[in-house]
Amino acid sequence: MAYELPDLSAPLELPFDDVIDVRSPDEFAEDHLPGAISLPVLDNEERAIVGTIYKQESPFKARKVGAALVAQNAARHLQGPLADKDGAWQPLVYCWRGGQRSNSLASIFKQVGWRADVLTGGYQTYRRAVVAQLYDHELPHRFVLIDGDTGTAKTEILHLVAARGGQVLDLEGLANHRGSVLGPRPGGQPSQKMLESRLVAALARLDPARPVLVEAESSKVGDLLVPPAVWQAMQAAPRIRMQASVEDRAKYLARAYADISADRDELKDILSLLVRLQGHERVNSWKEMVDEGQFEALALDLVTLHYDSRYAKSRSVAGEPAVRMDIALSTDGLASAADRVLEAVERLRGAGSQNGQEGRTLN
């Protein structure tokens, strides 16, 4: 049987015990259906071999070689990760287009006695639905942006708001990047396709009738693009601007980026990326601060000489924030800021505030 992919605007809850991705490991790593398990019928090398035979020799020989490899891999799956599945197990199987690879494994599953279905159109159907939502249509959600200069703890406040029951969309978390030159996180960034899958899944869990707090970002988070529908909703959103002294921001950054400063050589490599913008002399002085462990002084220099000046222009284009909020960056101060941001989000929801209005300052 073939199973039709449901609408992705709601959480993807499929009526199957497991979703099996039979594509190659490289294809799976780039992107896959949420919650899918990788059980490839051809690994990366085998897929390349079969493809080469198909193009250079004959489709018949490619199918023959491919069938033998599929049978070998299916046997390994049956004797390995699937060995404990009982007779009632019901999987959904998919490949790139819902063709030979998925049908070959599903056929074996059916011979075993399992009620296996194949996803109509395979991964391509899912990918088209993701693209349609993020590229072809407007989002039904209304965003409110949390804005502020570097070091105003926007990401931490976002998480605190979520812990208080507020709706948030954590773009930096989904993209696994802090959104600045010092932004790389362990594990690196996902592919663009994987980010978009994560975004669609995150949006599906949000109630469009309630406002969604999003951290103000550029059109890229690290190396990844913010898809058009999300970016357009961000540009139309009112802003809550966090404000704190440069000294407090530097102290906060030194604490928040302790994981990066722990590897001094890596930090100096990251700072080298700023030579084009700041010149060798200044970057070399920052590297000396790293060697001397002067991380708070380094953070203060980066805030005053790099981040603030570069981001001032983009903020002027964005217009006046709806709310300005002076905050303290201590543990208690951030907890208080999260409470106030949550209240401000609800007020903006009722007022229907837009960018360009004169902002209010909340102390």
Image (cartoon, rainbow, N blue to C red):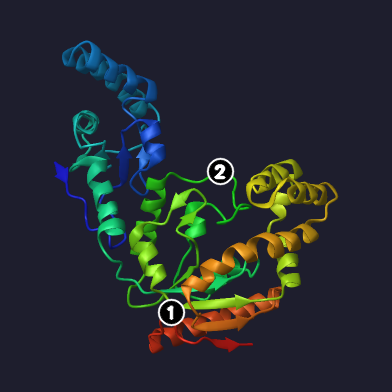
Residue at position x 35%, y 28% from top?
77
Residue at the left extreme?
Answer: 1
* Number of the front mark, 1 or 2: 1
Q: Is residue 123 left or right of residue 169?
A: left
Which one is in front, 230 or 40? Answer: 230
Residue holding disc 2: 187
Q: Is residue 5 above or below residue 1?
A: below
> Residue 182: image x %, image y %?
63, 52
Image quarter in which the C terminus is found: bottom right
Residue at position x 50%, y 46% from top?
189
Q: Is residue 258 left or right of residue 147?
A: right
Q: Under tag 1, what secondary structure? A: loop
Tell me the distance, in whole angstroms, between the alpha carbons under discs 1 and 2: 36 Å
> Residue 260: image x %, image y %?
69, 50
Identified by mark 1, the residue type is Asn
- Asked if one can make out residue 303 in the rendered structure from this viewpoint, the answer is yes
Q: Are marks 1 and 2 in contact (CB under 8 Å)?
A: no
Q: How many marks?
A: 2
**Quadrant in the picture for residue 351:** bottom left
Q: Which label sits on residue 355?
A: 1
Identified by mark 2, the residue type is Gly
Which one is in front, 60 or 105? Answer: 60
Which one is in front, 237 or 213? Answer: 237
Badge 2 local density, few (<14 within 10 Å), some, or many (20+)? Answer: few
> Residue 259: image x %, image y %?
69, 51
Badge 1 local density, few (<14 within 10 Å), some, or many (20+)? Answer: some
Q: Is residue 6 above or below residue 243?
A: above
Residue at position x 47%, y 81% from top?
345
